[in-house]
Amino acid sequence: MKKIILILICSILILTGCNNNSTKHEKDTEESDVRVSEVKVTINDKEYKIKLENNDTVNEFIKILPQEFIMDELNGNEKFVYMNNSLTTNSYNPNHIVKGDVMLYGNNCLVIFYKSFDTSYSYTKIGHIANLDNLGNGSITAKFDK
């Protein structure tokens, strides 16, 4: 009789444990389906918010965060870095870049534009930083985080 009671108690504990794991997995799945609308970037110790686009590139970019990059200067209007990760692209020519645009050039070149100008190049838009300062000459350190 004692063995039967012990087996019943163990069975209940095992079933309860399985049920809790299932609930945890369901919560994890629900949380991963929640769309992130912005991330933060700290550039040379000043924090900004990037309002994100809703696309596959952004979904993949969020998954590799947090990241810290040294971004180099180019053309007096942008900072860029070639990432180790390649992302899905859906590039198009925006014709005009707006100061604060965060774009992907090719499938792994992350670009922050700090001046507005017309362009003939194609990019995949990641998001936009409102009130971005002029980032000046030289490299910057940019820390991206959720």
Image (tube, rainbow, N blue to C red):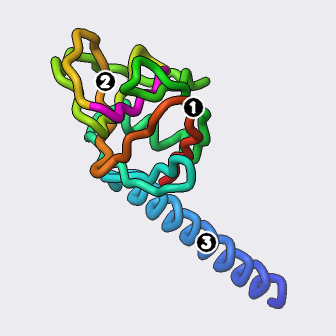
> Under tag 2, what secondary structure?
strand
Q: Are marks 1 and 3 in contact (CB under 8 Å)?
A: no
Residue 26 in the figure: left or right of residue 66:
left
Q: Answer few, some or many: residues within 10 Å of disc 2's Cα (few below 14, many 20 plus, some between 14 and 19).
A: many
- Is 114 a magenta residue? yes
Front residue of 18/33: it is 33
Look at 56% across and 25% down and name the residue there: 83
Identity of the amino acid at label 1? Ser
The location of residue 94, given as percent across then percent down, is: 18, 21
Q: CA distance from mark 2 to mark 1?
A: 23 Å
| Number of the front mark, 2 or 1 | 1
- Is 34 a magenta residue? no
State the residue position of label 1.
Answer: 139
Look at 50% across and 30% down and name the residue there: 137
Name the disc covering residue 15, or none: 3
- Mark found first going from the N terminus, 3 or 2: 3
Q: Answer few, some or many: residues within 10 Å of disc 3's Cα (few below 14, many 20 plus, some between 14 and 19).
A: few
> Under tag 3, what secondary structure?
helix
Q: Answer few, some or many: residues within 10 Å of disc 1's Cα (few below 14, many 20 plus, some between 14 and 19).
A: some
Identity of the amino acid at label 2? Thr
